[in-house]
Image (cartoon, helix red, strand yellow):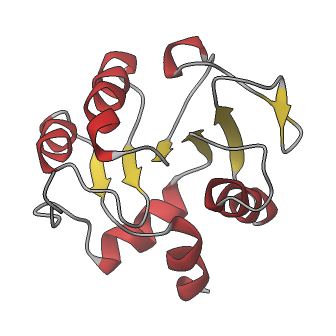
Amino acid sequence: MECEFPTINADPDEIRDIFKEVKTIAVIGLSPDATKDSHRVAKYLQSVGYKIIPVYPKEETILGEKVYRSLKEIPGQIDMVDIFRKPAAVGPIVEACIKRGDVKVVWLQAGIVNNAAAEEAKKAGMKVVQSRCAMVDHRNLA
């Protein structure tokens, strides 16, 4: 598969607004391994006050939070979905976000781009960030 470049992406003002508006972040692919990017980013976001909801196929708790197997299982509001999965997995995740109806932001971590899924998320009224690190962007705002 060729490397895609984001055709849809939030600008710096939108990213600033995202961090002001978001309170709850579901992290898809949040590894229990502290050396993995997903763990470090989620731990950072948790440390600056965001409620983190791990979505992972194994484990019962990660970062002291209950782990869910899918977005569908998560009770309550999800403001943002932060995705640490391969680009091919993003489409079904965006579909699950659309079905939920409460997700405001879909964030694809650094190196992850899926323009077709981003287009669908945007059409459904969500803000989209592709191929950017939420931790780096948040730190740069401080």
Which residue lies at the image location 32% right of the left edge and 16% below the top edge?
A: 99
104 on left or right of 65: left
Q: Nearer the viewer, residue 87 or 1?
A: 1
105 on left or right of 31: left
Which residue lies at the image location 38% right of the left edge and 47% below the top edge?
A: 105
Residue 95, quarter of picture: top left
Q: Nearer the viewer, residue 19 or 119?
A: 119
Residue 89, quarter of picture: top left
Which residue lies at the image location 89% right of the left edge and 39% below the top edge?
A: 64
On screen, residue 30 above or below 93? below
Q: At which x and y percent is residue 120?
A: 15, 36
Seen as rendered, the residue at the extreme right is 64
Which residue lies at the image location 76% right of the left edge and 62% below the top edge?
A: 35
46 on left or right of 26: right
Q: At which x and y percent is residue 142?
A: 62, 86
| Total numbered labels | 0
Residue 58, quarter of picture: top right
On screen, residue 10 above or below 92? below
87 on left or right of 5: right
Q: At which x and y percent is residue 91?
A: 25, 32
On screen, residue 41 above or below 77? below
Seen as rendered, the residue at the extreme top is 73
Q: At which x and y percent is residue 85?
A: 44, 43
